[in-house]
């Protein structure tokens, strides 16, 4: 009994020490993790909208909007605004493709002021390695094919993967993932067209850089054909 009690005490001490170390490590690295995440996001934003194309702090010049139908999430999503000398250049929408093969696919959809796509990047996903993960720029150049597209190019019927009669390639053995991304990009373009002027309204000086939640547009909701 005595040996059992001593063993229990020792195990308890190890558990306390281990928990304390984990908590300390988390607290000491929390700010660094936030910094790393911010830098990774900035790199992705600047892959879509280069630093030469805007002179504002694109990371701080953002709003938060809600539109589950077109942006794929019941939660507010961020929209980053790029400006040059105060004039709107582009918006980058942090849209969600909710119907990926293995769940949600998180995107950045960059749209120039005229409605042309500046580029699209996948920032987070859980798609199958070697199949659905080809939507990731690090795995293939498929995602680069959205640049310079718009709601007019292709026409609405073309905003599908080729298997469904559209103009976008699918992957061998994986159609669900690219289909979800194409649909999410198309829906983002619709949202942008409906809300462009509202999205670029400047923040009041005393609110610059703060989060705002903008209700879903009261404009007629268009459903995606893809």
Image (spheres, helix red, strand yellow):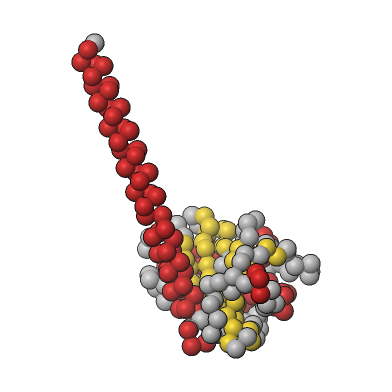
Which residue appears farthest toward the top when viewing the image? 1
Confirm whether residue 162 shows in the render: no
Q: Residue at x 39, y 50 (%)?
A: 27
Q: Nearer the viewer, residue 214 or 118?
A: 214
Q: Quadrant of residue 184?
A: bottom right
Confirm whether residue 56 shows in the render: yes
Q: Is residue 12 left or right of residue 128?
A: left
Q: Where does residue 180 sit, x and y in percent of width and height?
A: 56, 64
Q: Where does residue 115 sit, x and y in percent of width and height?
A: 64, 82
Q: Nearer the viewer, residue 35 or 186?
A: 35
* Image quadrant containing the C terminus: bottom right
The number of callouts visible is 0
Q: Where does residue 53 sit, x and y in percent of width and height?
A: 52, 87
Q: Nearer the viewer, residue 15 or 107?
A: 15
Q: Is residue 208 above or below residue 86?
A: above
Q: Where does residue 93 sit, x and y in percent of width and height?
A: 59, 71
Q: Is residue 25 above or below residue 164?
A: above
Q: Quadrant of residue 77?
A: bottom right
Q: Quadrant of residue 113?
A: bottom right
Q: Is residue 64 left or right of residue 26?
A: right
Q: Residue at x 37, y 55 (%)?
A: 29
Q: Is residue 147 left or right of residue 139?
A: right
Which residue appears farthest toward the front when viewing the image? 206
């Amino acid at each position: 009994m005595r040996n059992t009690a001593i063993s229990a005490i020792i195990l308890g001490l190890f558990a306390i020490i281990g928990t304390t170390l984990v908590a300390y490590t988390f607290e000491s690295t929390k700010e660094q993790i936030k910094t790393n995440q911010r830098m990774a996001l900035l790199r992705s934003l600047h892959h879509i909208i280069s630093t030469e194309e805007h002179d504002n702090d694109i990371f701080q010049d953002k709003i938060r909007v809600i539109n589950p139908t077109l942006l794929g999430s019941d939660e507010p999503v961020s929209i980053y605004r790029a400006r040059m000398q105060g004039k709107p250049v582009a918006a980058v929408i942090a849209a969600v493709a909710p119907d990926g093969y293995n769940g949600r696919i998180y995107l950045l959809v960059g749209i120039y002021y005229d409605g042309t796509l500046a580029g699209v990047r996948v920032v987070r996903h859980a798609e199958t390695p070697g199949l659905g993960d080809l939507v990731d720029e690090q795995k293939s150049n498929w995602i680069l094919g959205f640049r310079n597209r718009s709601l007019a190019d292709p026409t609405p019927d073309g905003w599908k993967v080729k298997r469904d009669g559209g103009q976008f390639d699918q992957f061998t053995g994986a159609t669900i993932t690219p289909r979800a991304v194409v649909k999410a990009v198309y829906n983002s373009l619709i949202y942008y067209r409906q809300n462009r002027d509202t999205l670029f309204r400047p923040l009041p000086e005393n609110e610059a850089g703060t989060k705002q939640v903008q209700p879903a547009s009261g404009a007629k909701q268009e459903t995606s054909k893809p």
